[in-house]
Image (cartoon, rainbow, N blue to C red):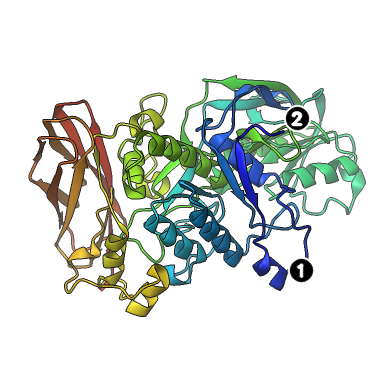
Amino acid sequence: MCNRKLIGARFNFSVGYKSHVGEDFISARDNNGHGTHTASTAVGSSVKGASFNGFGNGTAMGMAPAARLAVYKACWGGPEPNCDDSDVAAAMEKAILDGVDILSLSVGSEIENPFYMDHDALAGFGAIEKGVFVSASAGNEGPSPASLSNSAPWMTAVGASSMDREFLSLVKLGNGEAFKGSSLYRGPGIQNLPLVYDYCSNLGVDPHLFKGKVVMCNYHANSTETARLLKDAGAAGMIFVNHELLGAMDEPVDQPYLPATTVSFSTGEKIKTYVNSTAVPTATINPTGLTVVGKAIAPIVGSFSSRGPSAFYPDVLKPDLVAPGVNILAAWKEGGFQIDSGTSMACPHVSGIAAIIRASHPTWSPAAIRSALMTTASTLDNRKQPIRDAPTLRAADPFAMGAGHVNPRAALEPGLVYDLGSQDYINYLCGGFYNYTKKQIALLSHKWPACPKSESGADLNYPSFSVILKYGERVQVKRRTVTNVGGDNAVYKVRVKSSPNVKVSVEPETLVFKKRSDQASFNVTFESQVEGSEEFEVGEIMWKCIQGGIHIVRSPITVLWIPV
């Protein structure tokens, strides 16, 4: 089993779990599958003939297959593991001491806290002080706004998007209408059986109600358990309708009990109309067992992916970007593969790409790596149209997708980077917007901070712009500095996109770099054309290399108004 991939596995991080839950089998072994799945996504070696029950068949490989893996197990319990904040922080601190280059953090809290009370943010600050890049999942509480996890500006928060891969299952009604669904069920289908609609919340009450029928169920958190109960009740098949908030995103039903398919909420409404229109509705389910690649529009931001703005820190745009996190095939516990979804699956994609960037540019800081990832991210899908958001199928805004969808090849050569160090983050926290005390900052930095006398450092040199205007405030100016990591004698020209409500101007409009590592600064002025608004505005600043390269360095803009 030794292939020199796994170079360490520590598991003595369970004090917090034991203090309020109890004992568990303390071992480095993965008894849940989540850790194996995410680790193999980041750095898994090439495996031919990988699939989940024949779905997604092909060669599986992580983003950075040549990277080494050190595991720090800090989550305990059964199918829904408990990740105590103190255990996770302890594991992160040990990893930093061991000298890792990248920390991949596919965990997070459902409740956002101030940084000095956030264990992950505390440990993450220690990571960037040592030059360790931290990639973290943005959370699965979408599409509600301000639902983020891991919003600290020194960590890279990753949302989830889809791929152009589908697991098709077809539903045909008695009136001839046919609809596309998704399923991971492999077996014979069912033909022209009676169709009933039920909330499926009282499956044990009248088992004869479902016997020999296809049952269409409203959304429940656990479709697998619902399918098992329907099987026990004698049902012949299941149509599982996604929640309205999930929009067009169909996560396939993964269960072995009976022919089943997942359909979108809008498709479910059409099927309900049919059920109510006839005395004897029938349905056919054909789980094709096919994996179809290249037909679906992608990427689309996943409905479940948590959204910005940050409840505590809206002046830094989060999430930073999105990566594949819907129906991801990766390794699973005790061998084999599994298809799973979540920002936990998106995070290791970025972790692996960051490892490749670190190997190519070993002197780059974590902030420079994040900048490269963000400023080269794509905002267009495979049709060359704006990336869409699953709940509405309208163009995704930066609070859903951050800077855009990660582009690994472009991130290796970004042209310009927005760099930051630990003192820059301390200056940011010293600024007047949040009024952090020196004692609170010291909890992060482990030393009494040397705050600047003015608030000039409160605006981070971040590769995105999140502008907070008070009602009646007309003008705000932000300053940025970029470092040339491209060729010599490079010249960049700015292009701005803004809304009628906010005029955006950049000075100077041209940046000139004589050699690599040269820096240049510019000011961005935001002029509100309205007293205030309950809506937010979006835009972008794009630096295009017009001499010495072909780089395009893009930064998203969001503008929010807050009452005085």
Q: How many marks?
A: 2
Q: Is residue 43 above or below residue 428?
A: above
Left or right: residue 460 compared with residue 291? left
Disc 2 residue type?
Answer: Tyr
427 over 378 or under it: above or below: below
**Figure quadrant of the C terminus:** bottom left
Residue 81 position within the rendered picture, expressed as x and y whole percent measured from the top left: 69, 56
Residue at the (77%, 53%) spot, across then down? 201
Residue 190: which quarter of the image?
A: top right
Question: Where 435 sits versus 44, above or below?
Answer: below
* Disc nearer the start of the sequence (2/1): 1
Q: Where's residue 61, x and y in %?
A: 57, 28
- The residue carrying pointer 2 sits among few (fewer than 14), some (14 to 19) or many (20 or more) residues within 10 Å by Cα, namely many
> As shown in the figure, which amino acid type bears the numbered disc 1?
Gly
The residue sitting at 15% across, 26% down in the picture is 548
Q: Which mark is residue 22?
A: 1
Q: Nearer the viewer, residue 432 or 11?
A: 11
Q: Quadrant of residue 40?
A: top right
Residue at the location (52% across, 53% down)?
98
Mark 2, residue position: 185
Crowdedness near tag 1: few (<14), some (14–19) or many (≥20) residues, C-alpha within 10 Å: few
Judged from the image, the secondary structure of the residue bearing numbered disc 1 is loop
Name the foreground residue: 401 vs 92.
92
Q: Can you tell which of label 2 and label 1 is closer to the viewer?
A: 1
